[in-house]
Amino acid sequence: MSGGGGNHSEVGLFSIVRWGVGGTIIVIGGTVTASVLLALWFRYHTLPALLLSALTYAVVAVVAFVKITEEIQPTRHIDESVVGKVGVVVSEPTPSKPGVVKIGSQLWSAKASCELKTGDKVVVRSREGLYLVVERASNED
């Protein structure tokens, strides 16, 4: 996450699907390969080119279907022991979008009810799902 502006609330297809390099290479490379094989079949009417083209298209379709329907589950659970700890803002959370805070040596996604600036000290008040709920730390925290 960067603090350089821009609208971070819009997530592109590749972020949602999480294609990765391997999935992208298989889909693009497979589609190109299958298309070349299909063109060879149209030109020379060779059965192996048609069969390989169909098989390659099928592999591409399966990979694309799996990646599109894949549900990504978080592998890390937020530990309740962070509630009450003081941290620092790394990427500014606002009431309309989450940001990032550093608690100890760990980075956490965080929400705040008020606007915070990078470098502000915050205290963790609770959690909402995968987000920590933070507020500006008072001098007592």
Image (spheres, rainbow, N blue to C red):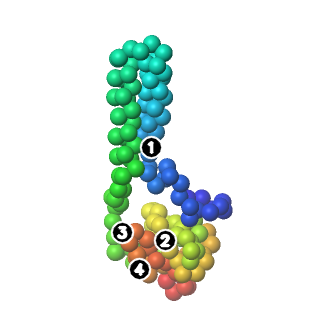
**Percent from the top left, x then y, of residue 78?**
36, 68
Gap between marks 2 and 4 measured at Cα:
10 Å
- Give how far apart the Cα atoms at labels 4 and 3 are: 10 Å
Pointer 1 residue: 20
- Mark 2–mark 3 Cα distance, whole angstroms, equals 11 Å
Q: Is residue 124 above or below residue 105?
A: below
The residue identified by callout 2 is 110
- Pointer 1 and pointer 2: residues touching (CB < 8 Å)? no
Q: Earlier in the sequence, mark 4 or mark 3?
A: 3
How far across and how far down the image is residue 121, in percent?
55, 75
Percent across and percent down for residue 56 are 37, 29
Residue at the right extreme? 5
- In this view, the residue in front, 111 or 86, is 111
**Depicted 63 relative to depicted 115: above or below:** above
Q: Residue at x 56, y 61 (%)?
A: 10
- Identify the element where label 1 is drawn: helix
- Mark 1 vs mark 4: give the one in front: 1
Question: Given contact means CB atoms under 8 Å apart, are the residues at marks 3 and 1 in contact?
Answer: no
Q: Is label 2 in a helix, a strand or a loop?
A: strand
State which quadrant residue 76 falls in. bottom left
Bin the neighbour count of mark 1 within 10 Å (Cα to Cα): few under 14, some 14-19, many 20 and up: few
In the rendered image, is residue 40 in sight? yes
State yes or no: discs 2 and 4 in contact (Cβ < 8 Å).
no
The mark that comes first in sequence, 2 or 4, is 2
Secondary-structure class at tag 3:
loop
Q: Earlier in the sequence, mark 3 or mark 1?
A: 1
Number of on-image labels: 4
Q: Is residue 127 left or right of residue 10?
A: left
User: In the image, what residue type sits under mark 1?
Assistant: Gly
Q: Which residue is the site of mark 4?
A: 126
- Give the numbered dot on residue 78: 3
